[in-house]
Image (tube, grey):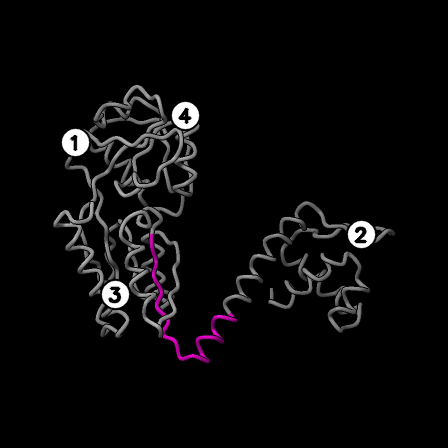
Amino acid sequence: MELRHLRYFVVVADELNLTRAAHRLHMAQPPLTRQIKQLEEEIGVTLFERSRRGLALTTAGQFFYEHTLQVLEKLDTTITATRRIARSNLLMFGIGFVPSLFYGQLPLLVRGLRQKDNVELSLVELTTVQQIQALKAGRIDIGFGRLQIDDPDVEQEILFEEPIIAALPAGHPLENTQPTLAELARYPLILFPASPRPSLADVTLGLFRRRGLKVHVAQEANELQTALGLVASDLGITLVPEQVGRLKRDNIVYVPLAEKHITTPIICSRRRGEPPSPVMQEANAILKVLVDNRLSGRYP
């Protein structure tokens, strides 16, 4: 599949008429028809219903159309940003992060780096495993996650340990307590992220399993916000890093655990053996201040 197939498909889907679509694309109709058929054959799905009255998107075609628009929009945005960087000689700096870190000090790092006029930041939501792959491929320059992963090409630094707390639906029997994991295990568990694994979901399950506790996973969610929405709907409880407690939502209460030693690390990942660029040096300096503030209690 080539990019032109997607662009041709979008124009045909917009026009629902091959003659008008071919005119817009400045090409003859027969080759356009062949390109659309090639696309359908490659995907293995009929995208258009064909009748005497013209074309109509199938259900699968409508789904493909909506997502293709997103792909092309993202591509156009990337091309525009790339041209801007080339014209202005900006330095690109990619940051990968797991969502739960954005409720703590990570925004302060981003804010500090954005004050540099010659830096273009790229923020990418990635699991720790995905961050390792993105670092090795050069798609990001630094990653912030929660899993320790042994890879010869990547170095990891534990910045600090963060307590784990429980997110409960409002009115839950444990709302005004500091529950133990044994008490929490009695209630349905919302697990996140569902994929890709390993992830915080495996860390959560490991906490219960190491204590011989069986849990009932009522639902798995890919996104933190979805998991919290399920908790607010009274479908279960979930465990989250302490920073997430800053996110106030209706029908959710956060409670600390009785076991104060249960924590999750915040881990910074960088490419191993690579001399730090000026932007990386600036990022490291900001990080040092943020970590020092956290460890000294100046930032909760």
Q: Position of residue 85 (x, y in %)?
A: 44, 75
CA gap between label 4 and label 3 equals 41 Å
Query: Which quadrant holds the C terminus?
Result: top left
Alpha-carbon span between mark 1 and mark 3: 34 Å
The answer to the question of whether label 2 and label 4 lie on touching residues, with beta carbons closer than 8 A, is no
* Residue position for label 2: 50
Q: Which marked residue is nearer to the observer: mark 4 or mark 3? A: 3
Check disc 2 and give the amino acid type: Arg
Q: Which mark is residue 234?
A: 4
Q: CA distance from mark 1 to mark 2?
A: 64 Å
N-terminal of the pair, mark 2 or mark 4, is 2
Q: Is residue 23 above or below residue 58?
A: below
Q: CA distance from mark 2 to mark 4?
A: 47 Å
User: What is the three-letter code of the residue carrying label 1?
Assistant: Glu
User: Is label 1 in a helix, a strand or a loop?
Assistant: loop
Please report whichever mark, 1 or 3, sits nearer to the chain's N-terminal start: 1
Q: Report the front residue among 200 and 173.
A: 173
Packing grade of label 2 (10 A; few <14, some 14-19, many >=20) is few
Tell me which numbered mark, 1 or 4, is placed earlier along the sequence. Answer: 4
Task: Tell me the distance, in whole angstroms, between the alpha carbons under discs 2 and 3.
Answer: 56 Å
How many dots with numbers?
A: 4
The residue pinned by badge 1 equals 259
| Numbered range of the magenta stretch | 79-97
